[in-house]
Structure formats: C-alpha cells, structure tokens
Image: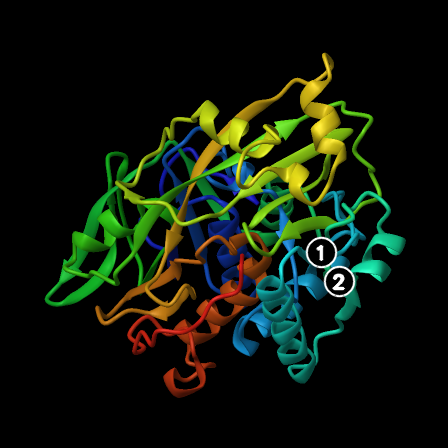
Amino acid sequence: MALVGRLPPTADVVIVGGGVIGCATAYFARHAGLRTLVIEKRAALATLTTPVATGGFRLQFDNPEEIELVRESVAFFEQLARRHDIGLTHQGYLFVSRTPDGQRQLQTMGRRMMGWGVDVELMDGEEAQRRFAYLAPNVNAGRFGRQDGWLDSRRLALALAAESGADFALEVAATGFLRQGDRVTGVQTAAGKVSAPWTVVATGPLSGPLLATVGLDPGLTTVRRHKLIVPNLPLVPQDAPMTIEVETGAHWRPGLRGAFGLWTAPAPAEPPAEDVPTSADFAFGLLNPESDHALARVTPFWREAWASPRLQWWLQAGQYTYTPDRRPLLGPSSVDGLAINTGYSGHGIMGSIGGSRRAVDAILGRLSPDANPFRPDRPMVPRAFDVL
C-alpha cells in the first residue's frame, strides 16, 4: 500500500471508494497484476459504512450463490488472521423462534441449507435452552451454525489495503468520469484526472448517484440501519453466539465487554447520505422489555439490564445499499470501461472477499457473464428472503 500525494496520469484500474469493498477490490486487482489506484474522498480509509457494520459473517444464507461468496470470504479471513489481528472469532450464529410459524420457518430454511452443504444444527427448544442457558423458556427451536462469527470490519479493510500493494489517494473525490464516445476512460477529480481502461464504482450507499452521471440506474435503494452499542455489561455472556429472534429479526452479539444490538426490520428508503442521523427510538425498541421486538423476548438478561443503573449505550448509523433482489452487483456494467462492486444489501463484510474476487475476474474476462449470477445486468427475479 502506498499513499500518493499526487494522482498518477494513468492506471490499469481506478477504484472509487476506500471502504472494505474498495480495499478488497484493490487487493484482487493488484494481485492480478493491474496497476491499481484507489481514490477516497475522506481523510482516512474505511470511515463511512465499514466501521458501522457489526462485522458478522455466516454461511446460514437463503441462497446457494451467496453461500459460496461467504464461504470463500471466511476461508480468506482465516488466512488473513494469521498475519493481521482482525478480531476474527467463530462463536456462531444462533437463530431461535418462539412461535409455531417461526419454528417452521427456521427449520425449513435449515433443511434447505443442509441441502446446499452448510453445516447447521437444528434443535428443539429444550436442547437450545440446555446448550445456551441464557435463552428464555419460551424458545421452541434453534438453528446453530458453528462456522459463523464476526470480525472487526475496519481492521479487515486496513489489512486488505496494506497487503494490496495498490496506490491510495485520500481526500480525492470523483467528480465525474472521463468519456471517449460511449466508453468510460477514467475518472475526473478536483485534484486532476486519471485515465484507465477500467473504473470500478465501490462507493456503497453513494454508488447510485455516481452511476447516474453516466445514465445507469441499477435500482439501488439506501436504508438507514443502526447499531446499538452497550459496553461493559457483565450480564452479557461473552462466549455467546450472535443470537437472532426469527419472528422479529432483533439480534445481538457480544462486544466491548457488553454487546452490540441490531434490528433489520423493513424501513423506508432514504436518500444516500454521508452523515446518517441516529434515533433514540431504535435503542428503546431493543432495550425496553415492553417493546414488540425487545431483545428480552428471547434473552431475559436484557430485562435485568434495562433495570440496571449500570446500563449505558450509544448508537451508530449507516446505510444498507439494497438491490431489487438483495444480491450484489459484481462486474462490468452496460457502459464499457465501467464496472460495479456494490449493492451487498447488508452483507458487505461477509461477501467482500468472494464478491471482489469475482468482480475483478469478470473485468479480466476470467468469469463469463453466463457464469456470474451477480452480473449487474441480470434479471432481477423476486424471491423469498431469510430473516436477515
């Protein structure tokens, strides 16, 4: 990795965006032998949505194509963790239910995953409560994947940047694209222009407006998502897995000697933003035991936490970038010279490695459009989604 103070006049590929996806793209582009430049409008890498992510990864997915993305990512994380401290832990994901409908959903998806080669365990409520003693008596089923876990998302991005060997230019915003006829031939910035055979848009929630400047509309929507941070709470078992209630989607995992709390219920789309405001209502919705999606519904120690004078918390907020089918856009766009690596729909950390490797392979012609289920011009087929 080299920080450059002056933009080079040319590169083989210019990557717009220095978050975890941009850094992963740079890693694979440079390791493929391409002269690679990453431009990032902020003063440091991985400071927009990357650090707001909870860092989770799971093979418990609702489609086999994304399972393969994550499987590749997890194998890479394990190798990278031998060289860098990225906070990698395999404590698993535990999905639990309280109702007959939730139990059916949990078990049906679990059997489907088994058919796709995912190692998951299905448990009745009694076994789930025996193995995970913090669960409530009303839990009637569980699904556990021991290979799942989490890491520190910003440390991951910085490790990828360090190992990429690419050039990085900070505080350089893309203001437009260079064009030659209908082809994109590079990037225009306030600091100058860079010509390149390929430009990759990897700007997360800001991707839509940038793509619109060349007439592309891949149907991206941005939705605000919060992360509740509850530090130093001894009630939280620090060896617990990510714990998710199927009926509500509310979930938590250990962190900072306390926990991170999340909820990904349907929310209205909002304009893309760099500074995303937080709302205390999100915290109350998870922490107040009377809420219809309270964490205490399946983990009773949260009721005790709510009453504790030691409870303290704060919020972060960022935006998920959703595609119509909730799967990422990877590879060349319909505009020659312009590729896309965005739209992970909340799964960017876990899909970052497998997705970015495929995006670069598609650029180089190593991955044909017919073999790329994530190509940007694919038909957007409606499908059923899992709870997360």
- Identify the element where label 1 is drawn: strand
**Residue placed most toward the observer, 18 or 62:** 62
Residue carrying label 1: 93
Residue carrying label 2: 144
Q: Is residue 233 above or below residue 13?
A: above
Q: How many marks?
A: 2
Q: Position of residue 96 (x, y in %)?
A: 69, 56
Q: Is residue 63 left or right of residue 364?
A: right
**Residue placed most toward the observer, 246 or 25:** 246
Q: Is residue 211 left or right of residue 290?
A: left
Asked whether residue 105 appears in the rendered view, the answer is: yes
Distance from the alpha carbon under mark 1 to that under mark 2: 6 Å
Query: Disc 1 vs disc 2: Cβ atoms closer than 8 Å?
Result: yes
Q: In the image, what residue occupies the spot 65% across and 61% down?
A: 58
Q: Disc 1 marks which amino acid?
A: Tyr
**Residue placed most toward the observer, 60 or 305:** 305
Q: Disc 2 marks which amino acid?
A: Phe
**Residue placed most toward the observer, 47 or 325:** 325
Q: Is residue 62 above or below residue 192?
A: below
Residue extending farthest left:
181
Q: Position of residue 88 (x, y in %)?
A: 75, 48
Q: Position of residue 268 (x, y in %)?
A: 31, 45
Q: In the image, what residue occupies the spot 76% across and 42% down?
A: 85
Q: Position of residue 362 (x, y in %)?
A: 42, 75
Quarter of the figure with the C terminus: bottom right
Asked whether residue 8 appears in the rendered view, the answer is: no
